Image: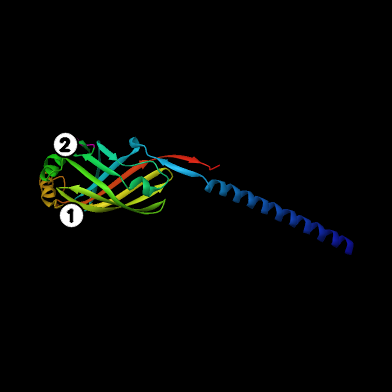
Amino acid sequence: MLKIHNYIFIALVITLAACSNKKSNEKATSQDANATSSSEVCQLIYQPDSTTLTWTAYKTTEKIGVSGTFNALEINGVKSSRTIQSILENASFSIAIDSINSNNPDRDYKIRQFFFSNMLETESLTGNVTSVEGNQKLGKATVALQLNNKQKEVPFTYLLSGNQLKLTANIDLLDWNASAAIDSLNNQCYELHKGGDGISKLWPEVKIELVSTFKKDCQTPS
């Protein structure tokens, strides 16, 4: 009986040792694979045609969002690079006001005629990145935005998810002395900006979102 117990014990030890070696080998293989992956050097290649800008304005006291874009968006100084900081640090942009597009031609006409026409030197919106802080996934990009003959810095947050870079910011048009332009557009759209309480309101806050999809080119150093 003792011999049988000994055989069972020896067999159990051998089995456990074999399992342990298998797991260790699997772990080592996994670590090697990760090491190979992490050693890749990837460059993000900018693709201008993939870049879109969306703005969201708000009407009524319930703050209902109305969104749109600009069809003519020109971005300069963005270069292909391995880091977000290098990609954004020299970026600048110009947006033609006449290209506004909210999928409503009548609304677009009113925005151009009664909002932007009440601003100084605002045939286009221009700006440039003044600083970038963060890592390869998220951070902040400060943009100097020129509007109504006034320049003010706006903090954008950026997020890189896969190949897609998204920058978002919330601006207050009153920072650019745009109260007259806001009142002009709200008066023109008075009934359309009324909520359930009968109050007509156009908010000075506007959300801006810029999205660009990069091509990723990865190489493993030899």
Residue 3 sits above or below residue 37 on the image: below
Closer to the eye: label 1 or 2: 1
**In the rendered image, which residue does mark 2 sit on?**
106
Residue type (three-letter) at the residue carrying disc 2? Asp
Identify the residue at horizontal 51%, vertical 45% (top origin): 40
Residue 219 lies in the magenta-colored region: no
Residue occupying the far front of the picture: 222
Residue receiving disc 1: 175
Q: Are marks 1 and 2 in contact (CB under 8 Å)?
A: no
Report whether residue 147 is seen.
Answer: yes
Q: Quadrant of residue 118?
A: top left
| Residue 17 placement, left or right of 186 | right
Which SS does the magenta portion mostly show? helix
The N terminus - image quarter: bottom right
Q: Label 2's element?
A: helix
Residues in magenta? Answer: 103-109
Of 96 and 206, the residue lying toward us: 96
- Viewer-nearest residue: 145 or 198: 145
The picture places residue 24, in percent across and down from the top left corner, at 67, 54
Position of residue 9 in the picture relative to residue 153 (left or right)? right
x, y percent for residue 46: 37, 39
- Which amino acid type is marked by label 1? Asp
The residue sitting at 26% across, 47% down in the picture is 128
Sequence-earlier tag: 1 or 2: 2
Q: Report if residue 194 is visible in the image.
A: no
